[in-house]
Image: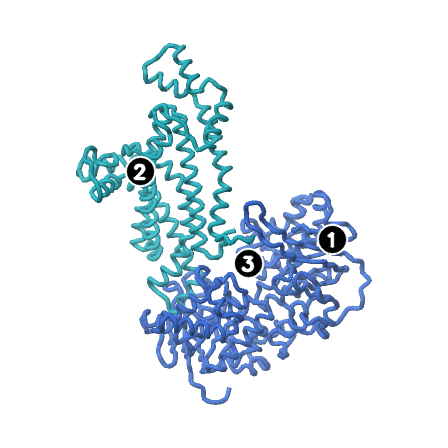
């Protein structure tokens, strides 16, 4: 960046100690970073890189004394922060520097109204009267484009949407016009279209006010969207730092290259010729309404239609992506076709056999052919059982002999590229990516024809994500599997899916081969989804490194 | 619905209506349970008299309606209850309702003061312990809590009597007022308060330990939540952080427990009232069981279940007030 910017935040030689017995001694070491006025610096790293600890160290919100700064200086506009007493730090927090957090639902106090929570910042740092404070709060709510500031002022966090909650968080951070804002993954929990609006809002307000922003993220798409400067962090060490254009287009360090290469390309695979393979999974006119609850002498709740009139076909060896934002009904679809949830009407056929009207014993046989891979591998594996038992459990229930099932489980581990020793360990001993491999092995143990994967990679780091996706694609081709792939991430869908259906409010708005849907979206909703993909204009320079 | 009924009122009214079948079931169940126990009012009366000839006993049974089958007795009782008639107490020779109203005040006083003491000190101590978790203060508070919790209330009552009445002579041994003093106005209030100190302490310490432990865990949990970090990032700290952000959220599980435990406090008052000879419902329940005074006992059960239902509704209202995410429907 050209021109002499005033330096707002200057971090030198920072070192943060972790409690003894952790995986490393220092969360961060030799960490140097500066943020100028009106500059957005992105701190990028995978989970465990220490990026959030860096942010908390600047705010002096580390969980001391277990985790503390052992060396280095942090100065805000020339003032040394580390030597200040806690009372002076309190005066600075929220006034001269503020923070925006990842999950706006949990980051706001559920018991206080939105207005109260913004008002609290003013109450703590100014001597304004009650009426002046209220006027300021309403003004800042307007500035962050909250539709109806006066009624939002009295609303509680659970009464407004996720995007609006994040706007409230931003309003809270900006109300006193701080010099520095630290944004810790502020858009990770949001839908793409909302994410786009929030990123634009942050950028607009920052330009209007000349605020310096330290933006922490793991998503290179988001980085490409807003960064002026980028710093890449790996396991507590800064591997590369420089202007956005340089890092994005000409990364030097191998780790940066690897990270960028792992970002799924937006170019979908070439359309396969029309498949003549048999249809293995067919859904016809599915409909699911979550019934109105209550009745006599108790409260009533309106019925919610999660899926209306949904039909699709999945052929052998094919991958069908179900994409949509939260609340579009895509997860409901995945649960109906596995009959984890009963559909109101419609039919699901696996290899021509009806799943929805199957009796209990028929269903057990049918379940063998359709297996699921879940989103959170930690939550979906029983923590008290060994990996080999987790994998072999399904076949054993289906009547396979115990030792045969165990032998097969060990084979599957090598198929999902895990060492044989993994069989005797427990789920918590693995990383997120490895756990998802176990989840996949567990699904494969049943030798299914169809795998339904509900957001299988959204809890994983990008580099791990790429590996798991590659594994899924490999296995699909080798074992002639069909995949029903539910995701909110269009980049992931583009990489893996032959066909996609785009869902909005329980309905399919568009369906077709991935390549043609992405190249020439017909429905306005699909278009807005594609337009909202962060960093869509950025063409990553390196591919095929990973 | 065109009639504008305040949702809070509508909710409370509906809850009370919903409770009526529950209370009826409790009454029927208790009636049958009491009938299952051997012996009846006549046995107890005759026992007190030192025996009587069988013809007299039979006449007495017929007079009290005890010669009918259990189902007929139940039907008669429920019919009277439907007209809010609790019947006649053959032990006190008064209508049951008179017996109850003269004593319910004392019990309520004891219960409310015990729970208020337990709740206030429990919450405060728990919050302090959590604030200084794993420190010397925390250890001391937690150990003290364990001691209170482990001590049975009858033992604690006797210990208190021994120390404060017998040895030190500071507090009266029992009763609700000094007999024969006939104090009025504030002097009377002070007299009652003096009599209530030890019963309240004996009844509240166990619950105090409960609330303290729960509050400590709850505060520790809330302090780790994201919105507390947000509040600190805003520059809030100290008492403000503790009261506005931590404690109010941490109170939710404690309030739940408070509502649930109200009924156990009623049970605990039987022991404490008997030991301190407080003329309350608990003591009355004890003597009614001994004397097989069925009508009085049923009256006590009816009143207790009504109290518990009301307390549960109030708990829900308080809960909804504390947590705006809960909608009363």
Name the spot of residue B78 as percent of width and height, x first: 48, 29
- Marks 1/2 in contact by CB < 8 Å: the verdict is no
Tell me which chain the residue with mark 2 is part of.
B
Q: Is residue A440 visible?
A: no
Please identify which colour was used for chain B in the image: cyan
Point out residue A92 in the picture as x, y percentages from the top left corner: 37, 74
Disc 1 crowd rating (10 Å Cα; few below 14, some 14-19, many 20+) is some
Callout 2 and callout 3 share a chain: no
> Disc 1 marks which residue?
A346
Residue drawn 62% across the image and 79% down it: A538
Q: Is residue B203 left or right of residue A498?
A: left
Residue B141 visible in this rendered orientation of the protein: yes
Q: Where's the C terminus of chain A, which quadrant?
A: bottom right
- Front residue of this view, candidates B293 and A124: B293
Q: Nearer the viewer, mark 1 or mark 2?
A: 2
Q: Residue at x 69, y 57 (%)?
A: A451
- The residue most toward the right is A276
Please name which of the two marks, 2 or 3, marks the residue nearer to the observer.
Answer: 2
Does the CB distance between marks 1 and 3 fall below 8 Å?
A: no
Q: CA distance from mark 2 to mark 3?
A: 62 Å
Q: Is residue B31 above or below residue A418?
A: above
Q: Are marks 1 and 3 on the same chain?
A: yes
Color theme of the render: by chain
User: Callout 3: residue from which chain?
Assistant: A
Identify the residue under disc 3. A430
Mark toward the viewer: 1 or 3: 1
Residue B141 left/right relative to A250 = left
User: Chain A hue?
Assistant: blue
Where residue B106 is drawn, which disc sits there?
A: 2
Helix, strand, or loop for circle 3?
Answer: loop
Classify A349 as above or below B310.
below
């Amino acid at each position: 960046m050209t021109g002499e910017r005033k330096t707002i935040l200057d971090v030198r030689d920072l070192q943060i100690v972790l409690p003894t017995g952790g995986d490393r001694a220092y969360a961060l070491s030799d960490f140097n970073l500066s943020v100028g006025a009106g500059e957005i610096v992105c701190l990028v790293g995978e989970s465990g890189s220490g990026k959030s600890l860096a942010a908390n160290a600047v705010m002096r919100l580390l969980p001391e004394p277990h985790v503390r700064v052992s060396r280095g200086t942090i100065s805000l506009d020339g003032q040394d922060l580390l030597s200040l007493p806690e009372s002076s730090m309190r005066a600075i927090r929220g006034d001269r520097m503020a923070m925006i957090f990842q999950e706006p639902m949990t980051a706001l106090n559920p018991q206080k109204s939105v207005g109260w929570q913004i008002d609290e910042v003013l109450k703590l740092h100014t001597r304004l009267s009650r009426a002046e404070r209220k006027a300021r709060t309403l003004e800042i709510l307007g500035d962050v484009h909250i539709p109806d500031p006066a009624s939002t002022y009295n609303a509680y966090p659970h009464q407004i949407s996720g995007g609006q909650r994040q706007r409230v968080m931003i309003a809270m951070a900006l109300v006193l016009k701080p010099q520095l804002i630290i944004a810790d993954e502020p858009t990770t929990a949001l839908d793409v279209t909302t994410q786009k609006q929030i990123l634009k809002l942050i950028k607009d307000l920052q330009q209007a006010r000349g605020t310096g922003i330290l933006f922490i993220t793991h998503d290179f798409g988001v980085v490409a969207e807003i960064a002026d400067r980028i710093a890449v962090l790996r396991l507590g060490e800064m591997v590369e730092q420089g202007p956005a254009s340089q890092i994005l287009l000409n990364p030097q360090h191998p780790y940066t290259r690897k990270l960028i290469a792992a970002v799924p390309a937006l170019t979908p695979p070439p359309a396969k010729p029309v498949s003549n393979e048999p249809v293995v999974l067919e859904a016809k006119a599915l409909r699911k309404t979550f019934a109105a609850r209550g009745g006599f002498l108790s409260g009533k709740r309106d019925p919610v239609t999660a899926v209306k009139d949904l039909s699709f076909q999945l052929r052998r060896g094919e991958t069908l992506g179900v994409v949509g934002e939260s609340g579009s009904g895509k997860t409901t679809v995945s649960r109906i076709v596995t009959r984890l949830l009963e559909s109101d009407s419609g039919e699901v056929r696996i290899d021509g056999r009806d799943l929805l009207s199957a009796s209990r014993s028929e269903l057990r046989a049918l379940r063998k052919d359709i297996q699921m891979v879940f989103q959170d591998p930690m939550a979906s594996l029983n923590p008290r059982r060994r990996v080999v038992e987790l994998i072999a459990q399904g076949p054993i229930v289906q009547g396979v002999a115990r030792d045969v099932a165990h032998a097969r489980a060990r084979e599957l581990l090598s198929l999902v590229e895990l060492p044989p020793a993994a069989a005797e360990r427990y789920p918590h001993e693995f990383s997120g990516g490895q756990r998802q491999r176990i989840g996949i092995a567990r699904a494969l143990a049943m030798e299914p024809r169809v795998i339904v994967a509900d957001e299988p990679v959204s809890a994983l780091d990008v580099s791990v994500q790429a590996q798991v996706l590659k594994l899924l694609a490999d296995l699909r081709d080798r074992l002639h599997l069909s995949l029903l792939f539910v995701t909110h991430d269009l980049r992931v869908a583009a990489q893996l899916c032959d066909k996609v259906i785009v869902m909005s409010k329980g309905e399919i708005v568009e369906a077709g081969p991935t390549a043609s849907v992405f190249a020439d979206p017909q429905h306005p909703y699909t278009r807005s989804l594609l337009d909202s993909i962060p960093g869509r204009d950025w063409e990553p320079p390196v591919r095929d490194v990973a | 619905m065109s009639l504008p009924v305040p949702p809070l009122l509508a909710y409370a009214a509906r809850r009370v209506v919903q409770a009526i079948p529950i209370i009826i079931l409790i009454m029927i169940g208790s009636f049958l349970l009491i009938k299952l126990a051997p012996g009846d009012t006549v046995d107890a009366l005759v026992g007190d008299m030192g025996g009587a000839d069988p013809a007299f006993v039979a006449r007495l049974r017929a007079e009290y309606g005890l010669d009918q089958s259990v189902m007929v007795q139940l039907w008669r009782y429920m019919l009277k209850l439907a007209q809010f008639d609790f019947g006649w107490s053959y032990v006190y020779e008064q209508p049951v309702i008179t017996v109850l109203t003269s004593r319910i005040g004392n019990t309520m006083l004891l219960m409310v003061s015990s729970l208020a003491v337990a709740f206030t000190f429990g919450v405060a101590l728990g919050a302090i312990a959590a604030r200084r978790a794993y420190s010397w203060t925390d250890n001391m508070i937690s150990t003290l809590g364990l001691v209170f919790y482990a001590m049975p209330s009858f033992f604690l009552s006797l210990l208190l009597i021994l120390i404060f009445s017998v040895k030190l002579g500071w507090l009266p041994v029992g009763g609700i007022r000094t007999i024969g003093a006939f104090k009025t106005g504030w002097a009377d209030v002070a007299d009652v308060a003096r009599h209530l100190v030890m019963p309240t302490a004996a009844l509240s310490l166990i619950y105090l330990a409960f609330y303290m432990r729960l509050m400590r865990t709850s505060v520790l949990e809330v302090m780790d939540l994201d919105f507390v970090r947000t509040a600190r990032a805003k520059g809030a700290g100290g008492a403000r952080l503790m009261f506005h952000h931590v404690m109010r959220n941490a109170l939710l599980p404690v309030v739940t427990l408070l509502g649930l435990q109200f009924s156990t406090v009623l049970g605990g008052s039987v022991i404490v009232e008997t030991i301190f000879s407080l003329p309350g419902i608990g003591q009355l329940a004890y003597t009614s069981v001994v004397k097989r005074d069925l009508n009085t006992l049923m009256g006590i059960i009816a009143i207790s279940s009504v109290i518990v239902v009301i307390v549960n509704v109030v708990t829900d209202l308080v809960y909804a007030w504390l947590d705006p995410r809960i909608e009363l429907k």
